[in-house]
Amino acid sequence: MVLKGCYGFLKWIVFLFNLIFWLVGVGVLALALWILFDSNYFLPVAKDVDSYNAGTYTLLASGALMTIIGLLGCCGALRESQCLLGTLFVFLMILLVAEIAGGVWAYTNSEQLNKMISDSIQDTVRNYSKDKIKSNAFDLIQKELKCCGSEGYTSWSSSAYNGQQEGVSAMEIGISAVSPFNLPKSCCIEPDSDACEAARKRSILNQSAIDAIHSEGCTRKMEAVVQQYAKYVFSAAIAICIIELLGMIFSMLLCCAIRKIEDFKA
């Protein structure tokens, strides 16, 4: 009776943990699909479309794998299958090791991540108007984060938006940080105001015009956003790892309990 009672408890504990894991997998899958189909906010952070898509599809595959593993665990617990529970244990162990390795790599390479963000935003500003999709996406970032350019509004002096050729510095063609140059409308605090039009159309030397645009660059703003959400991602990753570890422990205990009950019946 005691063995059956423990067995029933373990069975539903394993089912509950795998149900939670399945729900988390569905959430990750939904997040990946959102990023995939609504790229306006995230695309400029990527150096190119290929790397952006690679990261998105990696997240999509992770969510799908978590969903499958959760479903596998639920079925293994309900059907009392040692084979499914053993397979669940192996998958969880592989996933846990991969997540720990990925977390260690991300922590030790945080400076590279910031550099990647900085280089990507600078590249987007330099090549603004060459790629309509990334240009529209960066306009959205400037509006939402209330920023202008990569390091500030003067970054636009070296942009293709002002006829700047790639690989040629602003100084080489006679543009200095105080010379007039055009700005995108998304740099303005009030995009539909007259002050905005004066600021973005070669009136940058006028102090009132400067006050009409966002002064802070988008690189620091984006790094702050990434750091803010990194805390939530890190907390979620720890929670997922704990769920996986508990899932491994309880699935193995349930598998052993099933074997003992079968031996007892025999």
Image (cartoon, helix red, strand yellow):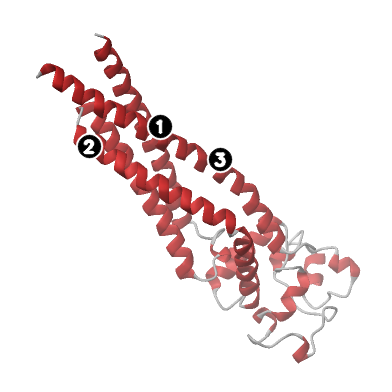
Mark 1 and mark 3 lie on one chain; the one further toward the N terminus is 3
The three-letter amino acid code for the residue at tag 2 is Leu
Q: Which element type, helix, strand or loop, lies under badge 1?
A: helix
- In which image quadrant can residue 176 be found? bottom right
Instruction: Name the residue located 68 percent from the left edge and 79 percent from the top edge.
Output: 159
Instruction: Name the residue located 24 percent from the left edge and 14 percent from the top edge.
Output: 4
Number of numbered markers: 3
Above or below residue 222? Residue 47 is below
Q: Circle 1 is placed at which residue position? A: 246
Residue 245 lies, in percent from the top left, at 41, 36
Q: Circle 2 is placed at which residue position? A: 84
Depth check: 183 or 85 in front?
85
Mark 1 and mark 2 lie on one chain; the one further toward the N terminus is 2
Q: Is residue 210 left or right of residue 32?
A: right
Depth check: 91 or 114 in front?
91
Q: Circle 3 is placed at which residue position? A: 235
